[in-house]
Image (cartoon, coloured by chain):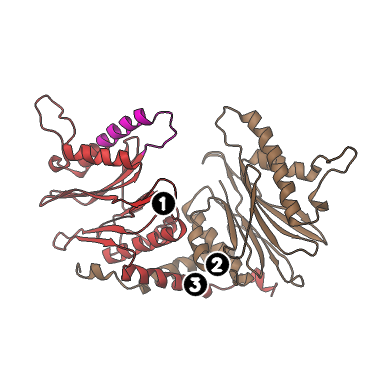
Chain colours: A red, B brown
Amino acid sequence: MTYCVGMLPEAGLVMIADTRTNAGVDNISVYRKLHMLADGEDRIVVACSAGNLSVTQTLLSTLEEGLPPLEEGGEPRRIAHVATMFRAAQLVSEASILANRAANVLLAGTGIDSSTTLLLGGRIGDGPLELFLIYPEGNFIQCRPDTPFLQIGQTMYGKPILDRVLDYRTPLEETVKVGLISFDGTLRSNLAVGRPLDLIAIPADRSEPVVRRRIAEDDAYFNELSTRWSALLNESRAAIPDPPFMKSAG
Amino acid sequence: MTYCVGMLPEAGLVMIADTRTNAGVDNISVYRKLHMLADGEDRIVVACSAGNLSVTQTLLSTLEEGLPPLEEGGEPRRIAHVATMFRAAQLVSEASILANRAANVLLAGTGIDSSTTLLLGGRIGDGPLELFLIYPEGNFIQCRPDTPFLQIGQTMYGKPILDRVLDYRTPLEETVKVGLISFDGTLRSNLAVGRPLDLIAIPADRSEPVVRRRIAEDDAYFNELSTRWSALLNESRAAIPDPPFMKSAG
């Protein structure tokens, strides 16, 4: 299982992914789920994946090799050459469909789920930062200011905090913090999501540096955030008045 | 869909259920999911249900009529006559199996899910307060002090707060409050869970009164709890230091 979140307030793009891969609880491993598809002068494109590991790896290798050219003698189509994030989403969608289709043939009748869902975020050329969620069937949706986040994998544990606290005006540091709080709750409640976490924060302001970070089991900041968040939740609970209908019972 | 939680700290038993029943988003109704199976001098037995509505209703009617007697000429077996909560759980399990089986025959091949999951809590005679989760297959588990709650339905949104804040020593008023916070997060994040909520709180101390409450859309306490909890979460977020690795980006 997996939990990945992409957040796109006006201040920038933050993507965070866990690294736990499991085939049953007795077979768990660390696999990177935050993938740099392009990282150059004119483009930075990042994908996070949830779902079947073999399909994800096939999809990534297909993108690296390039999709088949559209005309004979043409160039293989790569993320490095597309002109916009929309085109990047279309290319990743195409690679996802190919990888899913191949797996469906191999896994037919086994009951094994071959589906893979992706978050795709980044910026190409002079374009804005954009964020997409690509479904296993290949269709995709784009993140918009009214709900400035998209999630894949085990999304429910970490959704209430995002619903309540994140909005389009949240600064980038706060967005990272809220994302990590969302992860912390998920990590505590679901064994199928595990550290290390991989994080990338791309400021909308191009003069500011891109932050990349792996948050391991011994990450002092994350551990403090987790401890303090628990204490703060308990203080918050205590700060809410007792139900008046219970006082009659006291 | 549904969300129900049962909490059993040493101070007592609290059960809360939503009331939204839906067949698609364009067909929603209010149905009570917290059911009093017995409410007398020597016993109070409460069930919360999640799943197929027709199966739940058949199950409740079967319990009310009484399960078939075990020997010819015997009495129908009812919750009113069992000697312990364990026996009550067995009787409810038997009724659940009968109702599920009947529905499986009717719904075979339709793809409609006929499964129903139950929480069963209460106290019989001089016995302690007990809480069970009865699976659609009829097997059941009992709530124990290490994890003093059980959930059914849309459990994930409201689980992190329970995991962090509730323990066996939590007083009864606080337990009710934590339960309502868990519901509030779920109501905000999932349209398939809706108010009114039905709540019952049974103090372990038999000299204290049982509290029963329906929390409607205009419940002033719940609305204040919801508003304050959002504000407190935002204050808590602000109280956590910024990620040090983001400061270099500022």
Kindly identify which residue carries mark 1.
A155
Report the mark closest to the observer, 2 or 3.
2
CA–CA distance between discs 3 and 1? Answer: 23 Å
Q: Quadrant of residue B209?
A: bottom right
Mark 2 lies on a secondary structure that is: loop
Q: Position of residue A128 (x, y in %)?
A: 19, 51
Chain under disc 3: A
Host chain of mark 2 = B
Do we see residue A146 in this rendering? no
User: Which stretch is magenta?
Assistant: A94-115
In the rendered structure, the answer to whether residue B54 lies left or right of residue A223 reads right
Image spot of residue B244 (x, y percent):
26, 71
- Single out the residue that lies furthest toward the top: A72
**Residue occupying the point 43% across, 32% down:** A110
Query: Which image quadrant is residue B200 in?
Result: bottom right
Kind of residue indicated by mark 3: Asn
Name the residue located 24 percent from the left edge and 37 percent from the top edge. A90
Mark 2 sits on what residue? B166
For the residues marked 1 and 2, what is the alpha-carbon distance in whole angstroms?
22 Å
Image side of residue B159 versus residue A143, left or right: right
Q: Please state which amino acid type lies under the numbered disc 2.
A: Leu
**Residue under pointer 3:** A234
Label 3 Cα crowd, 10 Å radius (few <14 / some 14-19 / many 20+): some
Residues marked 1 and 2 touching at CB (< 8 Å): no
